[in-house]
Image (cartoon, grey):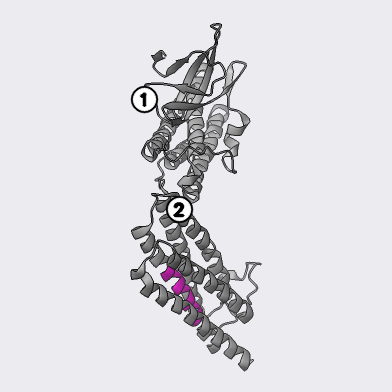
Amino acid sequence: MEQRKRTINVFDCLNADRVTQSETYQVGQYLEVFLYAENGACRSYRGIIQDCIDGEWEIRFMEKKGDAYVWPVKDDVSLVPGNGERNAPSKKSFCRETYWSSVDSIFKMLSVETTKISLAFSKEPFPSVKNTETMVTELEKRVLTLVSLYYSLPISEGSTLVSFYQKAVLQVLSCLAGFASSVSEVISSERHSDRLQWTGGVWEASGFHLPKDNKQCTLKSLAHTAELVQDALGEIQEAGETDGCAEDLSEDPDHQHDEGITWSDQDRLVVSASEGLVKTTKAILKKAQESIEKRGSIDSELAISTLDDFVSLTSTISSSVDDFICCIYAPINYTALHNNGKLLSEVNIKCLQFLRDSDLTNNQDIKWLDFLMQAVSHNLQKLEEKVQSNSDQG
């Protein structure tokens, strides 16, 4: 088998989808492949290296239509936002270091190719049609490689990681689409401001620091949720400064609070109990992050799925806190506040129970797990007592 640069010659495999090779290639690399039939007929294909299993490179080929090569419908870029096909290489064949090195490289290449086009259209005379096609083709190769790499990440690496990765890919593709439109405007109207803006957008999206394993993504997800909970605590404090008057919400149709009405003494006691429940939620997230930092693992599919399950469990915390906090403004809807407080407490208890039952904690963590479990019950009981006291007074 003769090897020349990035071309692989393969005999007797006109319809093959795998080729054996001896040189070092990378997953995600773009190739042109010549396939020969027994009668000597030759057909040229273009494709992306998808995976390497037992010394064989698996290549996904493009289809030739006229003078152009196109991807089959299943590989179209538009499928990225949904649940498109995802390859599932065996755990043994997947090399994280090689894979993420390829991803980093392609992000850099996208930035480089975008910069080339941007500079070429920064002033007249603009490139010829032929030169423009050449530059666009190179950029298209990088885009297809990125999409192909995205689909070749095994789901066994973690659904949280896949979700973060998907958002990064979509952000880059969105910026590239904006960039392409801005270049068209340069040609038609000589507007350069959008071109520069979108070029910078591609740089920023391509230079984004992407967490490269499920543990990092889990910690990032929990940190984001913790920030939202902290924002909710800040909102409670701001409400205290206005004595519960929903001044900023008076024009929001989703909030049925009367402007000018403030808290009663009983309301303040209820809000204090509500704040304690939100603070407990924040403490649970903090301890969860510490536990995952210490004992979270990506060494097995079970460990990875444990992280995914916990992220799924905590995904409702932010909305639960928001629903709870929306009820504290005067006049307080005590029934809604109580019901939402119970729902938030249930989520907190599920999170603590999950941590207790998983490998993310051990016997050394029982003390704080028990403490936070008691804190949830105490704050909910305190809230219920204040709500009941208001009902008795009413």
Q: Amino acid at mark 2?
A: Leu
Residue 16 in the magenta stretch? The answer is no
Residue 249: give x, y in percent of width and height.
59, 70
Q: Is residue 125 visible?
A: no
Is 342 on the left or on the right of 209, as rendered? right
Q: Amino acid at mark 1?
A: Thr
**Does residue 255 sit above or below 172 in this rendering?**
below
Marking on residue 134? none
Pick out the residue farthest to the top: 39
What is the crowding at mark 2: few (fewer than 14 residues within 10 Å), some, or many (at least 20)?
A: few
Residue 45: give x, y in percent of width and height.
53, 18
Of the numbered discs 1 and 2, the one sitting upstream in the chain is: 1
Numbered circles on residues, count:
2
Is 190 on the left or on the right of 20, as rendered? right
Which residue carries the number 1 mark? Answer: 24
Magenta span main SS: helix
Span of residues in magenta: 273-284
What is the crowding at mark 1: few (fewer than 14 residues within 10 Å), some, or many (at least 20)?
A: few
In which quadrant of the rendered view does residue 108 lie?
top left
